[in-house]
Image (cartoon, rainbow, N blue to C red):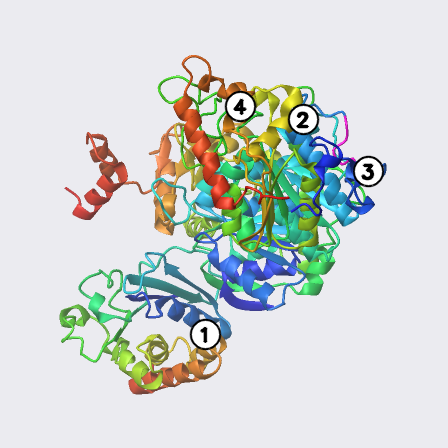
Amino acid sequence: MFQVRIHGRGGQGVVTAAELLSVAAFVEGKHAQAFPSFGSERTGAPVVSFCRFADEPIRSREPIEQPDALIVQDPTLLHQVDLLAGLGTGGYLLVNTTRSFEELGLGEFVAGFRPERLATVPATEIARELVGKPLPNAALLGAFAALTGRVTLASVKGAILERFPGETGLRNVAAAERAHDALGVSAHA
Amino acid sequence: MPRQKIKLYQVGSFAVGNRLLDPDDRTVQARSERSNTLTSGHRACQGCGEALGARYVLDAAMRATGDQVIVANATGCLEVFSTPYPESSWQLPWIHSLFGNAPAVATGIAAALKAKGRTDVRVVGQGGDGGTLDIGFACLSGMFERNDDVLYVCYDNEAYMNTGVQRSSATPPAARTANTKPVGFEPGNVFGQGKNAPLIALAHEIPYVATATVADLHDLEQKVERAMELHGARYLHVLVPCPLGWGAAACDTIRLARLAVETGLFPVFEAEHGEVTAVSTIRRQAPVEEYLRPQRRFAHLFGVPGRPDVVERIQAGADRNIRRFGLLAEEEE
Amino acid sequence: MRSQIEGSQAVAAAVALCRPEVISAYPISPQTHIVEALSDLVRRGELEPCEYLMVESEFGAMSAAIGASAVGARAYTATASQGILYMAEALYNASGLGLPIVMTVANRAIGSPINIWNDHSDAMSQRDSGWIQLYAASNQEAVDLHVQAFRLAEEVSLPVMVCMDGFVLTHAFEPVDLPTQEQVDAFLPRFEPRQVLDPAAPVTIGAMVGPEAFAEVKVLMHVKQMQALDVIGEISGEFAQAFGRGSGGLVRQYRSADAETIVVALGSVLGTIQDAVDELRDEGVSVGAVGITCFRPWPLAEVRAALGHARRVVVLEKAFAVGLGGIVAQNVRLALEGLPARVHDVVGGLGGRPITRASVRRLLGDVLEDRLDPGALTFLDLDWGLVQRELERPSGPHAENILRDLAAGPR
């Protein structure tokens, strides 16, 4: 089972990100589950969403306390909420930012991690350029696909288009692609 | 608005002889083939205004629709006296659900009929003042706002009669009820603003709102017929004196209803889509005292020393209604 | 067709397939996505003929459903928490009148204090209302139970509520296999009402019944519910044949046939419990789980048969009777009367506190090592320190005081 936890603020598409990721995994023949942590639904409030996928049916629905991958959609949360809790040194960490891990004050934290499992991506900037809105989730999903190799970019794109047909979908797909390519195609552990 | 002005001098009293009317305008009750929707054998009190009103309303509705009516009835006197297990007085499809939900049940019935394409069948929701104005008010307002195809009839006897005459939001000022007794300084019910249901219905701008009483049964029938010509939310508020609750003689029911109109205390009007379209004018304004004295629920206002100040306030209320609705007839002849 | 969708969307689709003719809807978290989806279907003409009523309250919602059902229309509504309480009077009315209304309950805690998250206190509060209560353990089962519910309700002339964990199921994306319209039409015949308001054959419905007959009328409801026990099993069997998968029924056993210790639960937490059971079984522990799918009527014989051989029974439930203890546990004890099993009443998950596999394992560890007194009521993962501190405080609103303590951190 692969467990992903996504952190962000209300209005950034955190919940949608988890849902789309689950659809992408489903399309690839996996069993997948996605659900939000149902806190306040106000724009700007911290939101967490979860996505699990596995080759066997998933029966448990508890929040993910030990994620295999963590996606941070909003770095301003980094020192406000304990969003790194439970992420082991073998895990993946993907942060939406133009800065580096050191500049974010995470240098020490990521020191024990496998460097090929860490990535930052300017997803908001990509989204602004290609989608016209600062909604970083699609870009982050593309980056996730590149970083972890657990789902393919094609599946991510398919999930986006199914949910957002037309112009919106195409733009988000472009963002996903751009972020994916920015990380480069790498061999995955 | 009565469809024709009856020349009352022809019979020399307030009675309107049926034989003087056009056959089409004659009351439903004069026909042998009337539905008799609320048939005899029910357990209403002698002189019950509500039984009289309900019979007229439903028979008129049945005639107007070719006997295609379904009724949703709130808990209350009418429901209780008409369905004493194992008997029923109702000769039409009738459902009693709860006290506060008659308008909502009627809404559901109308929706089901629409879904089934039964456009020929019409829905009547009915209840007393308690079930309509208090506990059922939210449902009533919802039904109005959605413009559901329901005629809702409120039989207003101005208190929770079925449970022993407790005060409702329709209880008039100064009236004695079981929980507004004339003890302490304020005699009887308080002088609040009241809750003017017909005006509230009018404010919802529904297709039809009308008030009526059992003193003019013809007018009542005609209003039901008018309502049945229309679709959407319609509201009929009928004053139905209760001899027991009002402390009046059983034979005074119709007379008291007439006095309520002629004092101006109960304005009779019709409105469509939020605009008053017709008003029943008062030929001869009666002083409120004439209406209040025969009712023991107002007895504490009279006698020694009595409360002439309260009577004056009630009179002021009646005068205000007359002004507000333009109830005094223009001088004729 | 199998797809990855939100639980609420799946349920809405399932309900639509059952061809309801009147839907009355008042929004309340976490049911909103269901009624919104149904509204879309009606507006787009994909669900017709159907009248969608936007009522003014849950009381109005159930009342409108009563009126509609009495006219012979298939009626549906959905609610949760405070909403089910607001319609409580109407719930009893519907069951007393024998109207086959189906309602989704997106299980949510009841205030005060106000809480929008999942537990079973809402449906449990209405367990005596005369409604049949079914609990879904997954979104697939939620879909399947709605189809079975309409069939069941109309066959026994009783209303049915299908319970699914609010947020945990309603807002979760999982794979769901939705049946086709043809399949549902074949399984769910046209609604033929026992009693109907129709000018062609007038009836009086809802008369007052005095002491001379009330008891018989009420007992009839009980008899019908007990008869429903058989019907529920039959329908579940037919469903499995028609749709190719098991769901519904009365109880579901998971590795419990030979288990010494059995955990009993309702709803989605069963998935977590099954994971824990598997882990413990791998470690050689004789443990299993029994899920109660039909809570009302209470399948006493089936529960007794499933649990009778166990040495220990741990009832883990998401509601409790204040001043008494477990609710499901009481019912389980009744079923196990005269048998030697020790029953543990455990309450967890209140107000949406997650029940984790780790917690379940710890709980079972305590049970197996006799650290839990079977007579006592146990609250899973409870901070007794917070409770104690508040008990010692002389004034102020409890909820606010406790929240402040929680924010301040341990002393």
Q: Circle 2 is placed at which residue position?
A: B81
Q: Chain of mark 3?
A: B
Q: Describe residue A66's horizontal placement relative to residue C166 as left or right.
A: left
Tag 3–tag 2 contact (CB < 8 Å): no
**Image spot of residue C344 (x, y percent):** 42, 33
User: Which residue position is annotated with label 4?
Assistant: B165
Q: Amino acid at mark 3?
A: Arg
Q: Amino acid at mark 4?
A: Val
Q: Disc 1 on helix, strand or loop?
A: helix
**Chain under numbered label 2:** B
State how far apart marks 2 and 4 are (Cα). 16 Å
- What span is colored magenta in the figure? B34-40
Q: Nearer the viewer, mark 4 or mark 1?
A: 4
Q: Secondary structure at mark 4?
A: loop
Earlier in the chain: of badge 3 and badge 4, it is 3
Residue C104 in the image: above or below residue B192: below
Measured in 3D between alpha carbons, the distance from the residue under mark 2 to the one under mark 1, in whole angstroms, is: 65 Å
Label 3 or label 2, whichever comes before in sequence order = 3
